Amino acid sequence: MKHESMPWTVKSRFLASLGMTHLLVSALVFLVLVGGAAPLLNAQVTPQRLLDSAKEPQNWLMYSGDYAGRRFSALDQINTSNAAKLVPKWAYQTMAGGKFETTALVVDGILYGTGQDNRAFALDARSGRPIWQYQRALPADIRPCCGRANRGLAILGDKVFLGTLDAHVIALDSKTGNVVWDVAPVDYRGGYSITLAPLAIKNLVIIGVSGGEYGIRGFIDAYDAGTGERKWRFYTVPGPGEPGHETWEGDSWKIGGAPAWITGTYDPATNTTFWTTGNPSPSNRGEGRAGDNLYSNSLLALEPETGKLKWYFQFSKHDEHDYDATQVPVMVDQGDRHLILQANRNGFFYLIDRSNGKLVFANPFAKVTWSDSKDASGVPIARKDASPTLEGNRVCPGAAGATNWMSPTYDPQTQLFYVTAREQCDVFSTAPQAYEAGHAYYGSAYFPNDDAEPFTGALRAIDPNTGKMKWEWKHPSPTWSGVLSTAGGLVFTGDAEGNFIALEAASGKALWHFQCGASVYSSPMSFAIDGKQYVAVAAGSALLTFALP
Amino acid sequence: MSMPRTSFRRSKFWPQRWRLFGCAVVVVCVAAVALRAQDKNPFAGDAKAAKLGESQFRANCAFCHGLGARGGGRGPDLSRAQKRHGNSDADLFRTINEGVPGTAMPPNGATQQGVGMTEEEIWQVISYIRSVQVKAPAQLAGNAAHGKELFYGSAACSTCHMIQGKGGRLGPDLSTTGSARSTEYLVESVRSPSRRLAQGISEAMKEFSQEYETVTVVTADGTKFMGVVLNEDHFTLQMMDTCEQLHLFEKDKLRSLEKSRESLMPAYDQKMLSEKDLQDLIAYLLAVGGQ
């Protein structure tokens, strides 16, 4: 890859232009070799490094930690025997309100994160002191749904990549935070925004859009990491003449939604990238969009170079309950079985054969009332009387789902899948409304049922072989925290009450907790520097790190 | 693709301080215009706008204020002519747009859950609220003065509830409850207090408020306390016992902890409180709540 080697070329030319001797250049090369490649090569993240992320567990090179989406750290310095001694090491404050959802990246001692209102920053991962800080000047008329949040960056070469609330894709120089390129895939005034962390594959930056609350037409784009040139676009709502178009009534496809707002995964063995999509629009009213509404609420298998669809699997057909399928599609191999695990917002845990998109099985992992039967292939299908009504119809899970964007984790040691579950049912009521570009377009209202039992949450450990729960850790109220597993035999999660918690991965026993002072709205990660392991999580407006004393 | 920030820096047309001054003047002018624009609903009396407003209301407001704006366990009945935080269009706009500090009413778009409304949509919601508003203030059926006597006297409400600084601490302060809850909710809270437990502390970013659950603990030394939960998380419990003593516990140090959704408040049936006395009591809550 040319652009990765460029800085070296530039540096050599620079030295040569200053009249430096070959001897000095040789000495520098010698220093690099003796001192280890890291210090001078820092942030030179080649595509090969991303493929080999398992070889450098001290770093966290992408949103989910690896291409498989496991959110598993192979570091084991912090483990079941010493987790009780964890202490806070440093905090970084964005000083912004709203949800702080970032999963930081760490590359060779530098931590890269994003904050509310499209802040981005690079910190000395040892001290938490900022190296650079960036904030996008956002237009005043953006109205992104669900908070002015961003979940993180992708890194490739000497750039980090940011999706913005005004629907731009921006490459920042990883050493300075300077804008290298800035492209606008679409006009934000149509209700589009970007909140996810992009995924870098080869020399491409792959990104999807948010906007399922506005009647957008969703898509996934790939950009050349060096130039920002768009290489392909996959519309998640097929246009006329494309397969799947017939699943939309009349012109409803034009405002069909199906945003792709969570980071995908990548299988190098078959050169396939997996992406998930959200609700059809309007989210809670099916009238006017008769049909299955492909590819809303689906898992898509795409070829990274072209965006060509290999296969799809739709979790919730013709959805009327906002059951976005935007949960990280986690890749797991069991012998010769190549699987995707997904605990879906609709309350079912799905095991899917990722070679062909066929369902292995689906089992509920939370309370479900929208479905009470399955089709011939085992796919749960909706009850006719589960649709929202004008007076309101109580359905479980509620609109926020049995889980949501918070990441699950797969621990290869326990071979368990851990997911944040939310037990909340809602009354779904229709609120017919006309489409108006850029305006909220729910077609519905939903609210908790006053008579219902109190809402709770849980971290659930699921055996992927059976879909059965091995153990659960109960949260007093539903949480928006994701989960990290580590080789130290631990899983880390947070709660709405502000606790960041370490549990024994095998049993669910709590070993340690820390009160962050505000709800955890992010998925944790882990890294190491100077041989010391850290665990990091965002809560309130602080990014907090923990390590052994 | 240049960034706005970059083009700002590159501009040599005006020195930066002049540019800033220019910006300040523009901001002041815009603010003045905006203030004027917010005085009067441009859609006043417009039935079509009220219909659009109903959709917005259902999506953004019904969560607390109920489907027909008649209130619920979380928010006031907005069909009442008298609104606690002001009755004029401008007051309503301000309340919706800026929220009410110290209450569960958030500023527009700041719930972190939904989308929020445009200025136009807020006016439509106000049109809708006006369309469902009861024309004249309802004549209070009860006798508020007698209700006050009951509150502090034979009904013994003040044993646990405070109004304007006077009364007990175990239950929620009821000074503003009359304006913050629908009459139906108030009646239900007296007759069947366990059906919907009152809400206590709300924390920023935490989705759901703490409820007034009943709790019984036995400490390591065998002492038993019964009271209400003030707040709790997985590891700690803050409670007030029936003697108004505050206790802060680490749960794993307790011998036992039992919670119940059966309210500590007695259910006032007809024998304990006649229908007329109940109406007097509600009249007192409404009167004091409107102050």
Image (cartoon, helix red, strand yellow):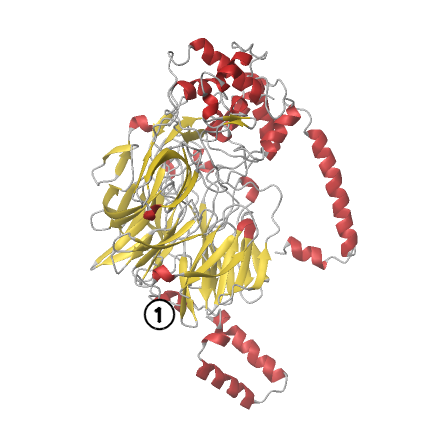
Tell me if B86 is positioned left or right of B168 in this view. right
Q: Could you tell me which residue is drawn at 52 percent across and 9 percent down?
A: B141
Q: Nearer the viewer, residue A273 or B144?
A: B144
Residue A200 quadrant: bottom left
The quarter in which the C terminus of chain A is drawn is bottom left
Picture quarter containing residue A16?
Answer: bottom right
- Label 1 neighbour load within 10 Å: few <14, some 14-19, many 20+: few
- Disc 1 is placed on an element classified as helix
Percent of width and height locating residue A41? 48, 74
Measuring from the top left, give residue B190's x and y in whole percent.
42, 19
Whole-percent x and y of residue A456?
A: 35, 39
Is residue B14 shown above or below B44? below
Residue matched to label 1 = A55
User: Does residue B67 appear to the left or right of B47 in the view shown?
Assistant: left
> On screen, A49 above or below B28?
below
Q: Nearer the viewer, residue A15 or B264?
A: B264
Residue A387 visible in the current orientation: no
